Image (cartoon, rainbow, N blue to C red):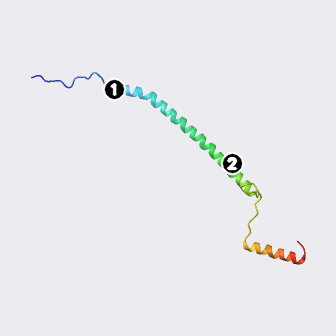
Amino acid sequence: MEEIKTDEKQETEEPTATDKEEGIQPETNRLVEDTNLAAKRLEDATSAAKEERIAREQSYANMKLGGRGERGEETKPEFSEAEKASRARIKAVGDVTGSA
């Protein structure tokens, strides 16, 4: 009886560790560069958005401090009930005395 050898080399060889590393290195470098570029773009976009938000907040604060509403029209201050009652008494006295 003859024994059949099963440990013979196959016609196709598997790539060695050095072959794998050499093939992966350029691809890895490209992926790292692409990732760094994407991170830079994200940082730039975030910075631009932050600057825009700060400008909007500053504009809104200036508008509110200047007495302008969101649409640009003049805003009337809101008075408390005590202030409204006081204004009504002053107006009533002015109406009675004839001065306005």
15 in relation to 96, above or below: above
- Relative to residue 41, is residue 92 drawn left or right? right
58 in relation to 31, above or below: below
Residue 90 image-quadrant placement: bottom right
67, 88: nearer the viewer: 88
| Mark 2 secondary-structure assignment | helix
Q: Which comes before the other along the chain, label 2 or label 1?
A: 1
15 in relation to 46, above or below: above
Residue 2 image-quadrant placement: top left
The residue that appears at 54% across and 39% down in the rendered structure is 39
The residue that appears at 45% across and 29% down in the rendered structure is 27
Q: Residue furthest left?
A: 1
Q: In the rendered structure, are the residues bearing label 2 and label 1 in contact, judged by CB atoms less than 8 Å apart?
A: no
Crowding near pointer 2: few (<14 within 10 Å), some, many (20+)? few
The residue that appears at 80% across and 74% down in the rendered structure is 88
The residue that appears at 75% across and 60% down in the rendered structure is 75
Q: Say which quadrant the N terminus sits in.
A: top left
Res. 55 mark:
2
Residue under circle 1?
16
- Relative to residue 64, is residue 26 drawn left or right? left
Give the percent coordinates (x, y) of residue 21: 39, 28
The amino acid type, in three-letter code, at marker 1 is Thr
- Relative to residue 100, is residue 32 drawn left or right? left
81 in relation to 2, above or below: below
Q: Say which quadrant the C terminus sits in.
A: bottom right
Alpha-carbon distance for marks 2 and 1? 58 Å
